[in-house]
Amino acid sequence: MMKQTLGIIVCRETGVKKTPPFYETPYFMQLAQEARNWGMDIFVFVPTDIRWDERTATGWTVRLDDTWVKTVRPLPNLIYDRCYYHNLREYHFYKPYIKRLCSDPKVRLLGTPLKGKLQTYDILKQNPELHPFLPPTRLYQSPADVFECIAKYRGAVTKPNGGSHGRGVAAIIPAQEGYLVRGRDQQNLIVSRYFKNDRELSSWLDSFIRQSRYIVQPYLSLYTSDRRPFDIRILIQKNEHMQWEVTGMAVRTGKPKSITSNLHGGGEAINIQSFLETHYGQQEMDFILAQLYQISETVPHTIEAHHGTLVELGLDIGIDRLGRIWILEVNSKPGRTIFLKTGELQLRQRAVQLPIRYARALLEQ
């Protein structure tokens, strides 16, 4: 009997000589090991390497001795999308290839990727239960949007609509009769600037954002008493019963004076229980956890109702200095490195097991 195969599509890693030539190889190796337990294997390939006339692809699979081997395989019927786009150019390059896969009647994706922060906000806004947790969000069209946000909320944050890992995020705060800007550029390098008037800030925003699609949100005070930014990452996944479950939660803290707590920007990961015990009383901690679980239950169903099937979600949650909880970002291609960094290896193992178990359930339908 032939093994069932889960295809995994990825973007080719450029600028380095690496075998295999893609990101997340440790994660895919673990997926291969888990798949083996269920009589399955994985086949990782770049969408540009499909031969549609033969319905085959050149890609990589894992041998029994846990080494990678390059091979040609039939195009799998079930595919897990792990394509990360580091910029708009990369996104537009891969878009037609992904679109063809999505429209092929013989191919099924584990989940339909989310389109962007603004589109996700518009979906979540349709559920009144989530209104208290959503920071006002609008499309950036000109510097006037930033000035309006600053006037109303005493600060603004600009974010790439399709970005991740904290790249291109900047906070703009009034200071000393001018504006202080802190964040990271598109290369993830620290940005710290002072502009003495509206004209200087407008000019900088035009050069920083250029033709990219950006959103504007209020600046939220999401930091601990010692001024370290933090957020909570929640990983939610479908299991073999096709039900959503919260795999785990962890806290990411950033460096003092940074505005992001992203691990790619030098942040640290902390067990959520110990973090909440350190910074909150028991009653407040219980209330926070109850709200986090409420959000975790509501968000996936709301998105699926208006967007389509998903397999997993990463939620980034902020808590401001007044104790209010905010949904900062929803990611349909979440990482799970955070559980390695907190030492919660069982959570990491569960995070790897669930996509394979869900895929197997779909293949057996």
Image (cartoon, rainbow, N blue to C red):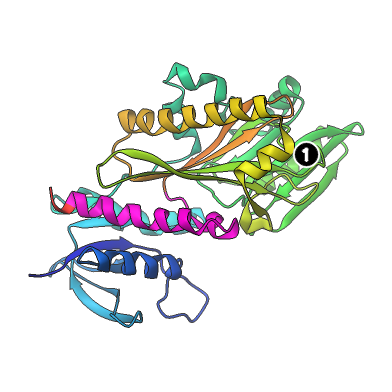
14 relative position to 34: left or right: right
Query: Which residue is found at the position 50% from the left and 59% from the top?
Result: 345
Residue 341 or residue 20, whichever sits in front: 341
Tag 1: Cα neighbours inside 10 Å, few (<14), some, or many (≥20)? many
Residue 344 falls inside the magenta stretch: yes
Q: Where is residue 1? Give x, y as percent.
A: 7, 70
Which amino acid does the dot numbered 1 rest on? Answer: Leu
Q: Where is residue 89? Give x, y as percent.
A: 47, 57
Residue 24 falls inside the magenta stretch: no
Q: Where is residue 81? Give x, y as percent.
A: 34, 55
Residue 359 visible at all? yes
Q: Quadrant of residue 58?
A: bottom left
Query: Which residue is found at the position 26% from the left and 41% from the top?
Result: 242
Q: Quadrant of residue 282?
A: top right
Question: In the rendered image, which residue does mark 1 sit on?
Answer: 201
189 relative position to 178: left or right: left
Q: Where is residue 70? Give x, y as percent.
A: 29, 81
112 relative position to 319: left or right: left
Query: Which residue is found at the position 52% from the left and 56% from the top?
Result: 87
Q: Is residue 123 above or below residue 231?
A: above
Query: Which residue is found at the position 71% from the left and 29% from the top?
Result: 281
Q: Quadrant of residue 142?
A: top right
Dominant secondary structure of the magenta stretch?
Answer: helix
Magenta residues, start to end? 333-362
